[in-house]
Image (tube, rainbow, N blue to C red):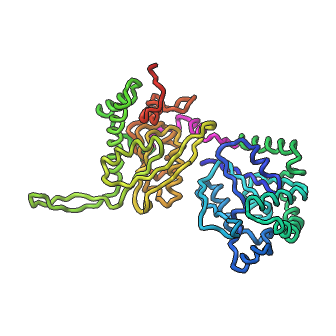
Amino acid sequence: MLRKNNLLLTASGRPVIIKSLNVPWVVILSMDSFYKPLTPEQSAAAFRNEHDFDHPNSFDYDLLYETLLALKQGKKVDIPIYDFKTHSRTDKTQTVYGANVVIFEGIFGLYDPAVLSLMDMKVFVDADGDVRLARRLQRDVSQRGRDLQGVLQQYERFVKPSYETYIHPTMRNADVIVPRGLENHRAIHLLTQLITQRLEKSHLNFRWELARVPHSLCTLTDKPQLTVLPATNQLRGLHTIIRDRRTSRHDFIFYSERLCTLVVERGLSLLPFEPTTVTTPTGALYPGTVPTKRVCGVSILRAGSTMETGLRKVCKDVAIGKILIQSDPITNEPKLHYCKLPRDMATGYVLLMDALVGTGAAALMAVRVLLDYGMREDHIIFLTLLAAPQGIHALTLAFPRVRIVSSMVDPSLSVDKLYIEPGLGNFGDRYFGTEPDLLD
């Protein structure tokens, strides 16, 4: 599992520190999302600028704690969306699937003991009172549809007293205090250096960490959940064609889809069946079987979508969902960009498809997403055309009840690009014709 690092930045000046961090896969969680819904009386007072939004009781600390805890555990969370123009929580949410770094920011971030217990680093960035007022005026007028007089009225009545009574005393809970806010460039620079050093020690490069697993630990003999197709002459012949760099794109597509059909057929044999009897055209009875659960497919884009044709050839009218997981161009870390899953997926079985499994990072994220949407772990069957031992080891270690079907497992990963060796190159590029001509 990815280690989660929660960096708490609170009070004025925090955006500067956030922008100074150059780290991948960061979720910034604002405390403003966790205002409590208002009663009709409170809402009416809010429109008169008479409701105190700057009191600790204005925030839903229980929901905030549950959300932060789930993020730290790598689970999916739905962040509420608060509309400051209507002073109400909307019926929409923002879905977050976890990250390497969770930065939680808010003026009451250092107030609640339960929330504090989740933090790995706590920072208080202070600023002059006039600066805080100027920023609030700019934000509330330009972003939240407030009028100038109302903002000033609320600031004098609620904001300033709240800072002196509740917020400023929480400075003692901070690990690091940055005085003078934006003007203290040296302190902010030192703080970002400290945070960066902590992140570097946390081994955030997940894919490379998976690839460095000792080969002795990646044996396949103790993996009962793994099914590898028998190495028949037909199977080896198909692999010979798709691995050959001289194979045309047309032939690559044709023979890889043939191979995919074999993998899908083997995966379907792992589904539960029950006995049934049918009458043949001759009038005789035939004792057969029928599946007991519905099945759907989920492809991990983009290479996983190449297996959809093979699935549709075998399963008529099967519902297929899609998960887009791509590697960050700088860090090479997996990132979730899109997720659309079949309705009622959790009532049956899922054939999760990706053409290749190298380190297993994308597969781990995809399985985690399915579990967050209610799938049972033992109802997920992962289908792939080719895998490396490191990816199989990571997937079976993290999710031991997920069953895996692969046409073949190659010996290792390359140390420079994490390609499967001997492998077949970039499957997606070869299938979709987006690779450079290797013969030029």
Farthest top residue?
440
| Magenta extent | 202-222
**In the image, is 109 to the left or to the right of 390?**
right
Q: Residue at x 79, y 43 (%)?
A: 192
The foreground one among 257 and 203 is 257
Q: Is residue 426 above or below residue 324?
A: above
Residue 104, image x, y percentages: 73, 56
Residue 293, by quadrant, is bottom left
Farthest left residue?
282
Is 220 magenta? The answer is yes
Residue 215, image x, y percentages: 53, 34
- Inspect this view and state whether residue 234 appears: yes
**In the image, is 142 to the left or to the right of 237?**
right
Residue 286, by quadrant, is bottom left
Residue 115, image x, y percentages: 73, 62
Q: Residue at x 32, y 30 (%)?
A: 237
